[in-house]
Amino acid sequence: MLELCAVDAGYGNAQALHGVSFSVGAGEAVALIGRNGAGKSTTLKALMGILPCRAGDRRFEGRSIAGLPVHRTSRLGIGYVPEDRQVFGPLTAEENLTVGARSHRPGPWTLRRVYDLFPRLAERRHARGQSLSGGEQQMLAIGRALMANPRVLLLDEPTEGLAPIIVDTLADAIAIINGEGMAVVIVEQNFAVPQRLCRRFAVMENGAVAWAGDTAAFAADRDRIDRLIGV
């Protein structure tokens, strides 16, 4: 459904991705793992179109979208939850959610559906984004992305720095989202989360995909993977 084909990308004069090829199919859950600075977040930004492809191609359902701006990428059905959440602090939780609905894509995700997924947001709907806890802000960032009714959801470190009980809540929610047919790409440092959610993995090192495979291959090659992701 969404793929990078031998993509180079970077920041200013610095090249961060070197010939990265990565894909997620309809309904899949795929994990991007690796050390800090390996290029995982940059790969998500390239998939979303936040960073342009200097070489290679970005494709959606077999069609090149390499030059498409971010707002048009979103309207295709690609959702993005950044690592720093980027909640609108002065807006209430509900106002933040309604911002996500402005793509006007039809689909099942409404305010009521997001509140069913995250009851805590319903309780805090009138609280300003800046007053929410870290876990509540992460729920809000995911809910806002869902309000655009994407077909693919890109999640950058969704459980980083959160208490174990909140991690479990978010992992359960992502499992529900994926179980209903939405494709998910997840970048995580908490390795237990992608192991629970994903059936395919890509390990990044120095801005390139160093290993890729499914759950069986992951288990068989665990020693090599531990060396790639170890500090």
Image (cartoon, rainbow, N blue to C red):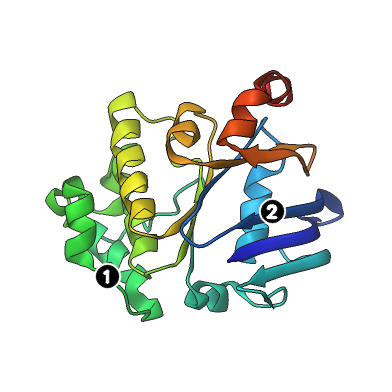
Query: Do we see residue 202 in this rendering?
Result: no
Q: Which mark is residue 96?
A: none
Q: Is residue 107 above or below residue 90?
A: below
Q: Amino acid at mark 2?
A: Phe
Q: Quadrant of residue 182?
A: bottom left
Which residue is at the front of the view, 173 or 197?
A: 197
Direction from residue 9 to residue 170 in the image, left or right: left
The spot of residue 130 in percent (x, y) is 32, 48
Q: Earlier in the sequence, mark 2 or mark 1?
A: 2
Residue drawn at (68%, 59%), measured in percent from left and top?
Answer: 46
Which residue is at the front of the view, 45 or 78?
A: 78
Say few, some or many: other residues with alpha carbon within 10 Å of mark 2 (under 14 / 14 to 19 / 20 or more).
Answer: many
The spot of residue 93 in percent (x, y) is 25, 57
Direction from residue 206 to residue 154 in the image, left or right: left
The residue indicated by pointer 1 is 108
The C terminus lies in which quarter of the figure? Answer: top right
Could you tell me how far apart the alpha carbons at marks 2 and 1 are, in whole angstroms?
28 Å
Report the number of discs. 2
Q: Is residue 51 above or below residue 169?
A: below
Residue drawn at (44%, 50%), measured in percent from left and top?
Answer: 85
Q: Is residue 67 above or below residue 26?
A: below
Say few, some or many: other residues with alpha carbon within 10 Å of mark 1 (under 14 / 14 to 19 / 20 or more).
Answer: few
Q: Amino acid at mark 1?
A: Pro
Query: Do we see residue 175 in this rendering?
Result: yes
State the SS at label 1: loop
Q: Quadrant of residue 86?
A: bottom left
Which residue is at the front of the view, 214 or 120?
A: 214
Residue drawn at (49%, 46%), measured in percent from left and top?
Answer: 84
The residue indicated by pointer 2 is 22
Which residue is at the front of the view, 127 or 166?
A: 166
Direction from residue 8 to residue 214 in the image, left or right: left
